[in-house]
Image: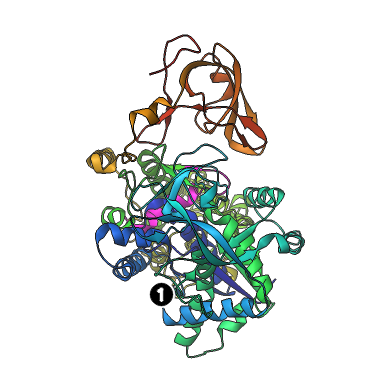
């Protein structure tokens, strides 16, 4: 076990507020783990901060007619406060626009530059003539050549996860003006990832207990072969490149953003009055570095950043990257543009933070996408927090106050059932710790609640309402055992519900927060004063849930204006339209494509011939459902190889506001022209 642990959470873009999906991805999981380790008295710090140089920030600034600095100043402060309100306990929350970050990132860049790591290459880059600027990756959108998703960005397809360059997109468009960009020459520094792939693979082989979904995505990238990736951009907003002749360029955001973990740790150390303390966490090999992220950041934290750290040579490498999948909302993807989101600040106006921490903790998307629903939220609060944990605590403290003088009674001649119940404290404690250590946080929470279930079952079976009349010694033993179980729960549940567990400890007369090692069968001394206090958890009524569901639907409906529809593409002439040959078709069969979870290989009858067409619809339709489906096909699209399969045409689809796809259908015979 390492002497110290450095935990980072992915730096959120400072271009908008935090919603439930963000919290479930990288922040709550990290906080649960860190709080558990602190209870174990481990030397651990949790570092995060605002990523303030992403292209989404410049786009947001342009849309609102303000400067990027205005945007990041607003959301940095707002998001920092929101995290505090929901109980995310960062040791330091930095920002990548700070002077300390600029210096750290530039020093890092120069270290690699001086070693000759970068390749200096001239390239053809997309240029928006109307905006008079080169277009960075995220300023370009188009159709993904891998899965056919039409809203792919120039650096990555968010549908299939494929890494892209803007020039690979089909029908690229400028995100600024919507125009088709032209190409112009520019020069950039590239990181030749392929040159270092063997060394990176050797290091990855030493990583233990990484999640299958994480390692699977990494291996997919490696199997395709790593290529050169530009580390500089033609932008005015970002960390300036500290090399003569490149002063008008800035660092690629995914070069400087992870270095934000380092610069924030340096700022934390300075705040402690120990300028060099950051080196213990970043440059001492006896440190365990753990990155908590969402799955869309896996490539950057498992391939690009480790390569940069490895090439620099002065920093520790990640021990683990327990990335989470995505959280959906009421069965649909979160969509801020469509108003389909639950914002944390609004949630906390209606409900206590610990309720959300518990419920989200039980559904974390650890290995696959998960779903938050208001009915499920209500159900877990009512049936688990109120009926199991809250009920057990209230029964125990009320009986103690009413029939044991409000103090912890002695344990005299305990029965086998008494001892078995007490033994469960240690049994569950070990299970919970094992789950936390393996980053199985949902399991850790479930095992903690199991102890409350054990306590409730024991209380009911021992019938203290009867034994208080027949044998007070047996009744006192029951209350003693239940109080010890409550005391254990007040610590074991502390990573999940810190505020509620502090309230519980006050009821139990525990004045100093115990450590993990203090969780024993005799935590509460005999004679300790106990107060039944306020009920820990109140049930949520149906009308409260209906209010939230109505609010979500109304919020989504309010955003359905012309501004929220996909903008019309640039005007074309009739002759351009006539060049497209759209034909009626019928799907004969469909099958999956290996290593392409978004793609299906379709065999389509066009009347005059049968064609193979690759379509990115695997997340929406099952192959066996598609035989006989009537479709419209762009039949004269140039053939293109997708995942090793030549696709001869494109199936026309319509996207609903919830992200679901519908076929553009016709009842015409296969081969009929669609005009």
- Residue at the farthest top position: 669
Residue 133: x %, y % from top left: 39, 61
Q: Is residue 32 above or below residue 552?
A: below
Residue 209: x %, y % from top left: 69, 56
Residue 219: x %, y % from top left: 69, 50
Q: Which residues are magenta?
A: 352-370
**Front one among 637 and 492:** 637
Task: Classify residue 193 as left or right of residue 30.
Answer: right
Residue 359 counted in the magenta span: yes
Residue 158 counted in the magenta span: no
The residue wearing badge 1 is: 97
Q: Quadrant of the N terminus?
A: bottom right
Disc 1: CA contacts within 10 A as few (<14), some (14-19) or many (>=20): some
Q: Is residue 590 above or below residue 433?
A: above
**Front one among 620 and 405:** 620
Q: Is residue 554 above or below residue 21?
A: above
Assign a secondary structure to mark 1: loop
- Residue at 40% in and 75% down: 97
Q: Quadrant of the C terminus?
A: top left
Residue 587, visible in the rendered structure: yes
**Front one among 222 and 469:** 222
Colour theme: rainbow
Residue 128 position by quadrant: bottom left
């Amino acid at each position: 076990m390492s002497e110290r642990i450095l935990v980072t959470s992915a730096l959120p873009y400072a271009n908008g507020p935090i919603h439930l999906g963000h919290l479930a991805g990288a922040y709550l999981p990290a906080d649960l783990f860190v709080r558990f380790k602190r209870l174990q008295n481990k030397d651990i710090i949790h570092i995060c901060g605002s990523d303030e140089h992403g292209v989404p920030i410049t786009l947001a600034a342009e849309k609102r007619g303000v400067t990027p600095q205005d945007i990041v100043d607003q959301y940095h402060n707002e998001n920092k406060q929101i995290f505090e309100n929901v109980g995310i306990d960062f040791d330091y929350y930095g920002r990548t626009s700070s002077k300390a970050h600029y210096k750290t990132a530039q020093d890092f860049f120069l270290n690699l530059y001086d070693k000759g790591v970068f390749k200096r290459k001239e390239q053809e880059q997309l240029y928006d003539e109307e905006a008079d600027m080169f277009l960075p990756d995220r300023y370009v959108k188009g159709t993904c050549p891998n899965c056919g998703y039409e809203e792919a960005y120039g650096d990555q397809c968010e549908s299939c996860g494929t890494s892209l360059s803007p020039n690979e997109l089909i029908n690229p468009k400028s995100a600024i003006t919507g125009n088709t960009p032209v190409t112009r020459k520019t020069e950039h520094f590239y990181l030749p990832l392929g040159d270092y792939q063997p060394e990176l693979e050797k290091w990855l082989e030493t990583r233990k207990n990484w999640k299958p979904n994480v390692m699977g995505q990494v291996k997919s990238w490696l199997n395709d072969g790593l290529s050169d990736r530009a580390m500089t951009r033609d932008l005015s907003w970002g960390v300036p490149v500290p090399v003569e002749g490149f002063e008008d360029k800035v660092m690629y955001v995914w070069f400087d953003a992870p270095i934000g973990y380092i610069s924030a740790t340096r700022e934390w150390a300075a705040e402690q009055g120990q300028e060099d303390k950051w080196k213990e966490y970043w440059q001492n090999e006896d440190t365990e570095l753990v990155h908590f992220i969402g799955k869309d950041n896996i490539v950057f934290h498992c391939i690009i950043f480790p390569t940069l750290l490895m090439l620099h040579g002065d920093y520790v490498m990640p021990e683990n990257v327990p990335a989470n999948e995505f959280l959906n909302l009421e069965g649909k993807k979160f969509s801020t543009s469509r108003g389909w989101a639950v914002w944390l600040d609004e949630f906390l106006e209606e409900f206590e933070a610990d309720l959300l921490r518990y419920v989200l903790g039980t559904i974390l998307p650890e290995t696959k996408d998960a779903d938050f629903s208001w009915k499920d939220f209500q159900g877990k609060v009512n049936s688990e927090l109120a009926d199991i944990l809250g009920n057990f605590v209230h029964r125990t403290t009320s009986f103690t106050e009413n029939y044991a003088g409000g103090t912890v009674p002695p344990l005299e001649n305990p029965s086998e059932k008494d001892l078995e119940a007490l033994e469960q404290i240690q049994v569950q404690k070990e299970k919970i710790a094992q789950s936390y250590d393996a980053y199985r946080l949902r399991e850790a929470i479930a095992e903690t609640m199991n102890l409350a279930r054990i306590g409730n079952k024991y209380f009911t079976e021992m019938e203290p309402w009867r034994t208080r009349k027949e044998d007070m010694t047996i009744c006192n033993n029951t209350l003693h055992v239940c109080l010890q179980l409550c005391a254990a729960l007040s610590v074991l549940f502390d990573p999940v519900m810190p505020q509620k567990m502090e309230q519980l400890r006050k009821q139990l007369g525990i004045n100093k927060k115990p450590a993990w090692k203090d969780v024993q069968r005799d935590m509460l001394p005999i004679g300790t004063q106990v107060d039944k206090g306020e009920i820990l958890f109140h049930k949520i009524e149906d009308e409260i849930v209906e209010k939230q569901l109505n609010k979500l639907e109304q919020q989504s409906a309010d955003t359905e204006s012309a501004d929220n529809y996909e903008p019309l593409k640039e005007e074309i002439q009739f002759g351009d339209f006539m060049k497209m040959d759209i034909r009626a078709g019928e799907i004969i069969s469909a099958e999956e494509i290996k290593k392409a979870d978004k793609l299906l290989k379709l065999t389509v009858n066009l009347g005059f011939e049968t064609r193979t067409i690759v379509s990115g619809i695997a997340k929406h339709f099952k192959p066996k459902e598609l035989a006989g489906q009537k479709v419209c096909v762009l039949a004269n699209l140039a053939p293109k190889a997708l995942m090793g399969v030549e696709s001869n045409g494109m199936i026309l689809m319509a996207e609903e506001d919830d992200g679901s796809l519908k076929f553009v259908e016709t009842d015409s015979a296969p081969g009929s022209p669609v005009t």
